[in-house]
Image (spheres, rainbow, N blue to C red):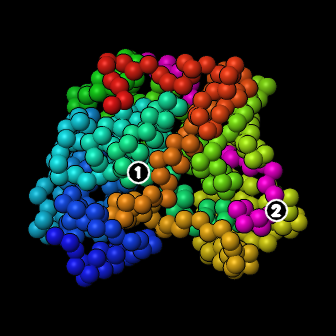
Amino acid sequence: MAPTPLQRRSFLKSILAAGVSPLLLPSRAWSAKVGPNDAIRLGFIGCGIQGRGLLSGFLKLPNTRAVAVCDVDTTRRENHRQIIETHYAAQTDAGFKGCAVHNDFRELLARDDIDGVVIATPDHWHAIIAVAAAAAGKDIYCEKPLTNTIHEARALMDAVRKNNRVFQTGSMQRSSREFRVACELVRNGVIGKISRVEAGFGGPAKPCDLPAEEMEAGLDWDMWLGPAPKRDYNSILSPRGVNKHFPQWRAYREYGGGGVTDWGAHHLDIAHWGIDADRSGPSQIVPPDDWSSADSGVRLQYPNGVEVRHIKENGVTFFGSEGEVYVNRGKFQIKLGGTVHASALSKEDKSALPIALDFAEKEYLANAKVRLYASTDHKADFLSSMVSRKQPITDVETGARTVIGCHLISLAYYHGKTIKWDPKLLSFEKGSGDSKWLHNEYRGGWKLA
């Protein structure tokens, strides 16, 4: 049955309340899978600290219902279930039938009562789960960095396109005003022609060398490892219980990409947004002279002549012929002709940032020709796109090309060679690189579906 005008208006009103721009709702968006009177039903895969943060955010949004969770740790998945059931009990939600729990993500994906999944596992699992979710007909919100290898990034783009899925990458800085305004200033030529960008984040990962530890019951360690090489348990990789810190599996190449992919998936993403490289990428990657011990210094050279430099200091700075724009979380500054025109560099002064952004928009963007996608809530933007079937603010190709850039940075640190890359074909130029660098061999029969 087609939705009534009142039902459509009601849904739009609820999404608008969450801070998302109105979108056209084609009739197929109200198909049997997500009907006009139905909440969007979500399953959550990965119940660590990042997964809990995402769950909390989604539970606050209208027209959603969390119906299932999955984690290889009994304590964490039961904690997720309890959070969900306590939330709906407080709401006296008559439509809530309880939260299912799963150890294996394939069981969750096989459910026909789930419209979308939220993936917040360690990075070495992202691609396998997301590709399987796309094949299962689920829309996907997947944490950054999107994949653990370049091959996985290419495969994931193919899977999402083939299955016509909505995909949101968790590089949520694009849904923060300071980053959008900074990139609009750059894209509208306010600081002139861009010559270089400095993007600051941590260094590369290293091979895992952690010693074996005794493991208490309740963790499926073989499933935690999944496609990664077999090794003994260590609590640094997967601390037991409901941990309140970000585990350091991300520091090891088997499971993550160190600071390069962790924060790089945020700040290189913003660099790409500012220089209009969301559908492009670097064509040459140059390592520093001390590449084997360095944690900064790689240079990415783009076809448009811009160079992005990996530096240590967290944040992103765009350098143009007429000035500079610096941006970070809660921070912003624009300089023109060497003079600061608007600045907010202290997170303690909460009023400074909106004042600086208001000034920049009024003074320099009132008649801007380039307007970037405006979102104020990354999760609500995903839900809105599930209804409209339009691409969200950080779609699969945006996330994939960002993480490919991060992986190319890591390869320069790992191998110390200048890499020539074809951003159209997403492959090494002839005579550059090694195809073995594109992927890690999977263990135990795991593969990209």
Occupied quadrant, residue 369 = bottom right
Left or right: where 32 falls relative to 231: left
The residue carrying mark 1 is: 167
Instruction: Check disc 1 and give the amino acid type.
Output: Phe
Q: Nearer the viewer, residue 120 or 139?
A: 139
- In percent of width and height, residue 197 lies at 74, 49
Question: How many numbered marks, from 0 up?
Answer: 2
Left or right: where 89 falls relative to 167: left
Instruction: Check disc 2 and give the amino acid type.
Output: Gly
Left or right: where 145 falls relative to 317: left
- In percent of width and height, residue 49 lies at 38, 47
**Label 2 element class:** loop
> Which disc is residue 192 wearing?
2
Occupied quadrant, residue 57 = bottom left
Residue visible at 26% across and 50% down in the picture: 43
Residue range in magenta is 186-211
Residue visible at 64% across and 42% down in the picture: 281
